[in-house]
Image (cartoon, grey):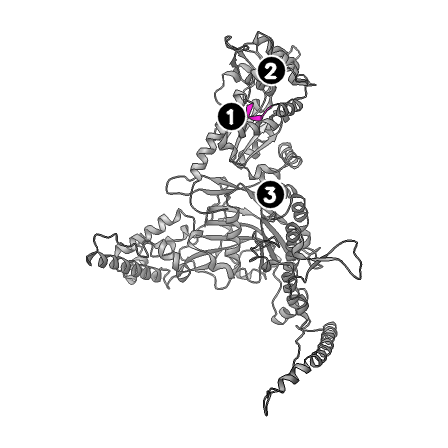
């Protein structure tokens, strides 16, 4: 048995999405404010019963309140409603519930979590209360947890209707009295509630509850472009009586805010709540306390404590004897008064009941007299790593009933849940890169390190993490990544939402393209999964200089999270499926790579020119954008943007330049980034007489009076031995980066990207949310 996926509806910006859960670990990734935190909160608030009542009105998808407030408006306009008459009309099909008095009119707007399991036919004893039909013999099992209004026997929201109308009319009457009382010159107060939303802001859980409904596996639909298609619940459906996840699923959570702080900080409010000492005490109390259901070894330990207590009491008695005798000379205690004596109460837990119970020993110190420091003197990263790993151990041992907790629950005759779901929010907090990787490599191993788990398929552990860390994403198989894609509001009444991309569909294939994408990202970095946009560049020179162009000339881009990936034009197109599935803005900066075809069909590198029947050898230009292979067609091409408007290709094209100040402009066609950079910064390179290497060659070339001659010499300089990266480094050493102008084709591409992100930012501006 395992969790196959969750479908979330109407929860914050997750209007409708499916999150498939891997057999081991699943990583939720995406740019800032893309919905990762929303997903984790939905899991926690719906699956952990004690957290159900933490759901508030702001957890509804914000735009849904437009329709829900419309229901409230119709209620206060309709006057008193005869619910008995409405029931009669419903029975004969003469009521369409235009006023939202029945539960069915609410459900499409309410937060819900669908839990889908894959269950073997032999495991039916775990899910007997969830079997959808008598013909079910194994496979998918689904249940919906939905926050919905409490209803009367006819599925009408009668109590909510009556109490909201009563409160609204009372407020309206009070305002009318205010106006009629001679206060017409003053602005009347806005009394609560003005809308149904305002009423429920204060009273949501007085009128709403989480109910569970069985789902039909036969009605499952595949998501459309990352948007789930959850099935509708029958209007006549009634909720199941008991909590469907009880005895089936154990859920444990490690939150992002774990309370560690600097030991010298004035703010220590959260430090004690999650200290290692406190965690060890809690673990001891639950699993090891000898006072609970003691065995022979516990009796021996308790006996030793009693011996110590007796000896300490004798010591206390003799030590306080003088003081007590002195008190007695003052006339107390008198006749029949209780006598004073001092005793101690030593308990096994007392040895751990202080903040320095956990210490860290310094290597090399004497065994008899070890040098040790309290836990708060260790770095935050180390504290956090140890704390999280220990929590995983504790969650595992609680699940497997290790120690005393097992004996206690044996008496209660409760079975171990077959599923264990662990949710970890942003494990990278306070951890440097290497420790992040250590944690993610070992987390699942820790959770399975028990004799009943290591080689036992009866119990399933599934780990779900949300992260902003490319280091953590790097250590997980890409098939386990779930990418949250931000979607802009579709209209003024809507709000930005999110859809989900299951990267197992991209990286799980056996094609050369999918294998290349995975291998390439593994050998570079995974910033792509967290960026606002990506720039694919041809070589190391572009990778070094493009970020400086952005910083110096494109302030809007500089304020966004842009990742620059170096990948040659012969391979960039292999990332096309990934880029398109992520739905991320992408600027491709690539070279012209002009070639001439010989009589034998062999392509030979050639200086670009017009009307010479030259071709491009660049696969990205030929197969991705703009899908042209003739140089003349590329020069005239105006369609440099993909159909969906998310990808733009920038490549060298003919430009007009003046070789000398005051001379006429002539057409020049750069071959690659380096000569395009020279043509954009002619004065700078003309003055580079003290340079060396490739810069020196470019300097000598640009001194030519004819621009054609200059371009020929630059083309010759860009042979296979040209050290392009060295040229970029030398430029950064000799000049302030702000002095460099970007080549025209790159300037056009960066301008396109900046404009797109500006528009996108306007689309996403909304209130609240930090996911």
Classed neighbour count for the residue bearing mark 2: other residues with Cα under 10 Å, few (<14), some (14–19), many (≥20): few
Question: Quick one: label 3 or label 2, which is nearer the N terminus?
Answer: 3
Q: Position of residue 93 (x, y in %)?
A: 31, 55
Residue linked to disc 1: 749
Question: Quick one: label 1 or label 3, which is nearer the N terminus?
Answer: 3
Classed neighbour count for the residue bearing mark 1: other residues with Cα under 10 Å, few (<14), some (14–19), many (≥20): many
Question: Quick one: label 2 or label 1, which is nearer the N terminus?
Answer: 2
Observer-nearest residue: 356 or 499?
356
Residue linked to disc 3: 469
Residue 144 appears in the picture as rendered = yes
Q: In the picture, residue 605 is in which quadrant?
A: top right
- Left or right: residue 21 versus residue 189 is right
Residue linked to disc 2: 687
Observer-nearest residue: 256 or 455?
256
- Left or right: residue 457 versus residue 168 is right
Distance between mark 3 and mark 2 Cα atoms: 44 Å
Is 229 drawn above or below residue 687 in the view shown? below
Q: Can you tell which of label 3 and label 2 is closer to the viewer?
A: 2
Query: In the image, which residues are magenta?
Result: 735-739
């Amino acid at each position: 048995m395992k969790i196959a996926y969750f479908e979330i509806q109407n929860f914050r910006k997750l209007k409708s999405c499916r999150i498939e859960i891997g057999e081991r670990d699943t990583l939720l990734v995406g740019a800032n404010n893309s919905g990762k935190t929303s997903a984790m909160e939905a899991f926690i608030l719906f699956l952990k019963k004690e957290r159900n009542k933490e759901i508030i009105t702001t957890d509804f998808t914000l735009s849904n309140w437009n329709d829900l407030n419309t229901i409230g408006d119709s209620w206060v306009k309709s006057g008193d409603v005869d619910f008995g008459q409405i029931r009669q009309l419903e029975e004969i099909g003469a009521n369409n519930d235009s006023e939202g008095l029945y539960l069915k009119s609410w459900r499409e707007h309410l937060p819900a979590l669908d839990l889908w399991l894959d269950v073997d036919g032999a495991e039916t004893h775990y899910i007997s209360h969830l079997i959808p039909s008598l013909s079910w013999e194994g496979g998918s099992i689904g249940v919906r947890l939905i926050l919905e209004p409490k209803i009367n026997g006819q599925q009408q929201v009668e109590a909510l209707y009556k109490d909201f109308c009563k409160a609204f009319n009372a407020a309206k009457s009070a305002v009318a009295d205010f106006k009629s009382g001679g206060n017409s010159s003053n602005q009347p107060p806005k009394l609560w509630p003005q809308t149904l939303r305002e009423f429920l802001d204060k009273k949501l859980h007085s009128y709403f509850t989480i109910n569970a409904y069985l789902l039909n596996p036969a009605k499952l639909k595949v998501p459309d472009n990352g948007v789930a298609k959850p099935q509708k619940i029958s209007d006549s459906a009634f909720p199941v009586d008991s909590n469907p996840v009880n005895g089936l699923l154990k859920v444990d959570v490690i939150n992002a805010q774990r309370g560690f702080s600097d030991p010298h900080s004035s703010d220590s409010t959260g430090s004690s709540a999650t200290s290692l000492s406190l965690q060890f005490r809690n673990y001891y109390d639950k699993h090891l306390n000898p006072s609970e259901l003691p065995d022979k070894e516990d009796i021996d330990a308790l006996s030793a404590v009693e011996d110590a207590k007796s000896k300490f009491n004798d010591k206390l008695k003799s030590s306080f004897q003088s003081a007590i005798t002195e008190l007695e000379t003052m006339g107390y205690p008198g006749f029949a008064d209780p006598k004073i004596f001092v005793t101690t109460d030593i308990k096994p837990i007392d040895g751990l009941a202080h903040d320095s119970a956990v210490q860290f020993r310094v290597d090399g110190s004497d065994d008899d007299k070890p040098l040790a420091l309290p836990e708060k003197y260790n770095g935050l990263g180390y504290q956090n790593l140890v704390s999280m790993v220990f929590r995983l151990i504790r969650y595992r041992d609680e699940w497997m009933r290790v120690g005393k907790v097992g004996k206690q629950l044996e008496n209660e005759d409760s079975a171990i849940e077959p599923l264990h779901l662990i949710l970890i929010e942003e494990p990278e907090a306070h951890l440097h890169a290497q420790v992040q990787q250590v944690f993610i490599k070992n987390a699942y191993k820790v959770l399975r390190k028990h004799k009943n788990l290591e080689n036992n398929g009866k119990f399933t552990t599934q780990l779900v993490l949300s992260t902003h860390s490319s280091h953590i994403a790097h250590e997980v198989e890409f098939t386990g990544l779930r990418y949250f894609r931000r979607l802009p509001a579709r209209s003024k009444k809507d709000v930005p939402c999110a859809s989900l991309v299951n990267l197992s569909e991209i990286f799980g294939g056996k094609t050369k393209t999918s294998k290349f994408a995975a291998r390439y990202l593994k050998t570079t970095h995974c910033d792509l999964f967290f960026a606002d946009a990506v720039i694919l560049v041809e070589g190391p020179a572009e990778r070094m200089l493009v970020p400086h162009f952005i910083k110096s000339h494109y302030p809007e881009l500089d304020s966004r999270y842009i990742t620059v990936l170096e990948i040659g034009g012969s391979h960039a197109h292999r990332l096309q499926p990934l880029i398109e599935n992520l739905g991320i803005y992408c600027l491709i900066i690539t070279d012209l790579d002009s070639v001439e075809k010989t009589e034998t069909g062999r392509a030979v590198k050639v200086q670009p020119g017009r009307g010479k029947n030259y071709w491009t050898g660049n696969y990205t230009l030929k197969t991705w954008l703009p899908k042209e292979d003739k140089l003349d067609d590329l020069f005239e091409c105006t369609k440099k943007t993909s159909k969906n408007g998310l990808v733009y290709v920038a490549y060298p094209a003919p430009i007009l330049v003046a070789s000398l100040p005051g001379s006429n402009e002539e057409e020049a066609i750069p071959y690659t980034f380096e000569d395009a950079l020279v043509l954009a910064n002619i004065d700078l390179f003309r003055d580079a007489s003290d340079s060396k290497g490739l810069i020196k060659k470019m300097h000598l070339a640009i001194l030519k009076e004819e621009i054609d001659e200059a371009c020929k010499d630059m083309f010759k300089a860009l042979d296979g031995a040209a050290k392009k990266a060295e040229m970029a480094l030398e430029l950064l050493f000799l000049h302030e980066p702000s002095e460099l102008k970007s080549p025209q084709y790159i300037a056009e591409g960066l301008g396109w990207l900046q404009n797109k992100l500006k528009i996108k930012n306007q689309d996403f501006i909304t209130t609240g949310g930090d996911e």
